[in-house]
Image (tube, rainbow, N blue to C red):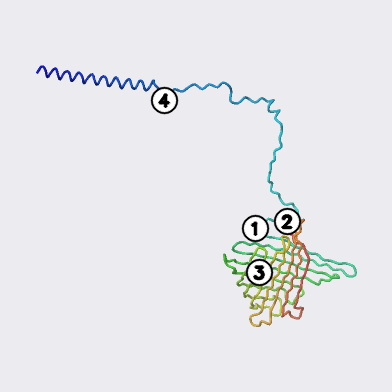
Amino acid sequence: MDLARVTSFSLFSWFVVGITVSCVGVASSATAAETIPGPYLSTATPEPLPLELTEPALAPITPEQVLNVPATDVDVMVTVEERPKWYYPSYWVQLPGWDTALELGINGSSGTSESLSVRTGGYIKRESDLRKIDFNIYHNRTKAGGIETQNNAQANFRHDWLMPNSPWTIYAQSQLYYDQFQAFDLNLNMNGGLGYRFIDEEHLELTGRVGAGASREFGSVDDEWVPEAQFGFDYEQKLSDTQKVTASMDYYPEWEDFSKYRMLTNLGWEVELAVPSNVSLKVAATNRYDSDSGGVDPNNLNYSVLLLWKL
């Protein structure tokens, strides 16, 4: 029994000594890892080093250095919207999105006979992807030898409804005409129908139309509404950046008798002037034919050379 106790005590002593040696070895290894550099970086946070500047980063600028800097030219572009002059119509009348113009033509002579012919007029237009609006008016007056030989006026209005992605259009129009030397006081016609754009290019446009309506000659022997058909076309071609020609024709036969009809024809040539840039030279001719004119000349031709003043 004494031998067993001695043996147990010896084993326990060796176990305690082994644990003590292991702890001392681990502590020594940790101390060596902190003092002896190894292939791996330490995870300990290093102490910050003081930051010292031996000289300033930017030297102060003296007033003498500023005054001695040579002057250099700098190009500066400033965009200023130029307002129209007071003698431009756009100075007084501003219609954004509308194309407007006034026209004036004067022709006179003196000597063995005196004559003076004046034509005035204008137009206002607007076009979008869905519609076209056109209103124009003119007045012709001529005196020869102090006697008035011509005095007529005409106003036209037309509204075209455009169909997207289609050459077809729907239109409505009206026309009021006055002539001192005709057998009526006023002629009014109103029409509507379908139009077709045969050509719709930037430099060339050709549109035809077919419709119906009615006309009336107020103050004439037949002062009543007369049903009539309508066939017509509009043509416009740009010859260059500054020139264009226009033509239009409308044929109005009576539904009851196609031998009775009216025909209206317009021709025009327009040239934009370089100076002033908003003025154009226009040569125009208009002819009205009425098969039932009431004993007066069935043809009424007006031609003129005038200036077109765009607003």
Element under disc 3 = strand
Mark nearer the N terminus (3 vs 1): 1
Amino acid at the residue labelled 1: Gly
Amino acid at the residue labelled 4: Thr
Q: Position of residue 249 (x, y in %)?
A: 69, 73
Residues marked 4 and 3 touching at CB (< 8 Å): no
- Residue 45 — which label? 4
- Residue 89 — which label? 2
In which image quadrant can residue 242 be found? bottom right
Task: Say if 93 sits above or below 189 in the image.
Answer: above
- Residue 206 — which label? 3
Residue name at image x 73 percent, y 57 percent:
278
Q: Nearer the viewer, mark 1 or mark 2?
A: 1
Amino acid at the residue labelled 3: Leu
Dot 3 crowding, Cα within 10 Å, few <14, some 14–19, many 20+? some
- Residue 97 — which label? 1
Mark nearer the N terminus (4 vs 1): 4
Mark nearer the N terminus (2 vs 4): 4
Mark nearer the N terminus (3 vs 2): 2
Dot 1 crowding, Cα within 10 Å, few <14, some 14–19, many 20+? few
Q: Is 11 placed left or right of 203 in the picture? A: left
